[in-house]
Amino acid sequence: MLRTPFASERIQMIDPKTGIKVIQLSSYPSPGGHFPYYWPSITPDNGRVLLYSQRWTGRGAPWDLYRVDADGLNLFQLSEHGDREEPGGGYYGRPHGLLTLDGETLYALWGSDLHRIDVETGDQELLVQLGEFCSDDAPLGTPYMSVDRNRLFMSTYGVEQRTVRVDLDTGECVEIDYGGVVFGCFQSEDRVVVQTGGIKWGTEENEKGERRITNVGDELAIWAFDQDGGDPKFICPQIFAHATVLGCKPQMQGCGRPPHRCIWIAGSDAEPEKRAQGPYFWHSGPSYDGEWIVADTNWPDNGIQLIHVPTGHFRTLCHAGATQDHYEFGHCHPTISQDGRLVVFRSDRTGMSQVYVAHVTDEFRESVIAGELDRPKDKWM
């Protein structure tokens, strides 16, 4: 067990343009990062936030897991595993992690070893070893949880596309061929979301001669299958720059690829819909109830936007001040609590990537629903 208290690194502030309270949760002079935006990493009572912190500043340094109260106090280290970053880069060198919806258990993947960690006590156990399903050239990626909460799905990325299903009660591991990479599970029906096609990163030039990173691999599409890989249902072509399952809804949400400046909503029973339009939304994460989406913006950076899904209205919540260049440390990647009242994001505004939380007031939420705008030139449709 490793449960080390560090009291607090918090720095409290008020966004000068929106008046929203923002707390810097990590301040140690090594990079910090929050969990990905596809799944809640904030406990359901909004009391705690999970985050990563690099053990020291250096390329290849390992990352440790922490929890901290949403007010920035009671920072606790939950793990200290390994002496190098994760093979294959992990989530940019971090162990892949997934918090259960009740906020009590954390599943963490170090290499091919899946561990279970008690968020309160820090007790840790090795659950299964998955070396037969992956390799250094094709490491396992993000875990996704089934609707019954009893199974995790993990796909490899790299030269191979393999998916393993892990039964959390029995430890049984089964390889399933979905014809692509799993990147979500619906939470209202027993279906697995799969991205078919291939990703091969390359570069392309725009009309100004500027280069940007782009996928030059096979055409991508999104499908939903039953757990065994049968009963395929087409959801949509790859219209998203980044996408996730829409909380507990049997739909996908995500930011449109240029030239579209929108949040797409897509399901297997209807054509994709542009739910919000205006700035270029870049990375977006939904609340588990599916009512709210938070998204950063770029080209230009208009701040982090809070979007009300039923109306499509949105408003600037706060400004991260991140560099937002190619490297992931400068991306905000905002994520939101299950009920949409806390927003966690990353910023390198201090010169070092750190984790922040914005506290969303009821008054602000009501203003978004009502369609109040920040400035006369702002718009929603």
Image (cartoon, grey):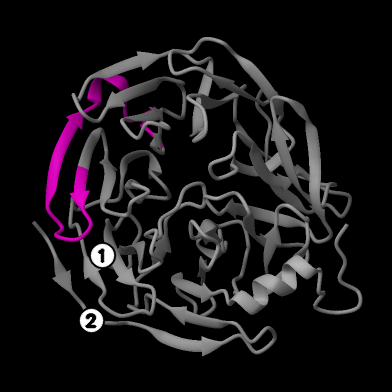
From which residue to which does the magenta span run? 116-141
Quadrant of the rendered image containing residue 378? bottom right
Horizontal placement of 308 versus 148: left or right? right
Query: What percent of the width, then of the height, locates residue 83?
Result: 19, 53
Query: What percent of the width, then of the height, locates residue 350?
Result: 49, 81
According to the picture, the residue beneath numbered tag 2 turns out to be 7
Assign the C terminus to one quadrant of the image: bottom right
Query: What percent of the width, then of the height, locates residue 120?
Result: 19, 61
Assign the N terminus to one quadrant of the image: bottom left
| Residue at x 31%, y 45% (from the top left corner) | 86
According to the picture, the residue beneath numbered tag 1 turns out to be 55
Question: Which amino acid, by three-letter code, is at mark 1?
Answer: Arg
Horizontal placement of 222 versus 139: left or right? right
> Depth check: 25 or 342 in front?
342
Which residue extends farthest top?
230
> Depth check: 257 or 227 in front?
227
| Residue at x 72%, y 62% (from the top left corner) | 298
Judging from the image, what secondary structure is the residue with disc 2 in? Answer: loop
Is residue 97 shown above or below 346? above
Q: CA distance from mark 1 to mark 2?
A: 17 Å
Question: Which amino acid, by three-letter code, is at mark 2?
Answer: Ala
**Label 1: how many Cα within 10 Å (few below 14, some 14–19, many 20+):** many
Is residue 55 shown above or below 6? above
| Residue 359 forms part of the magenta stretch | no
Query: What percent of the width, then of the height, locates residue 374?
Result: 80, 78
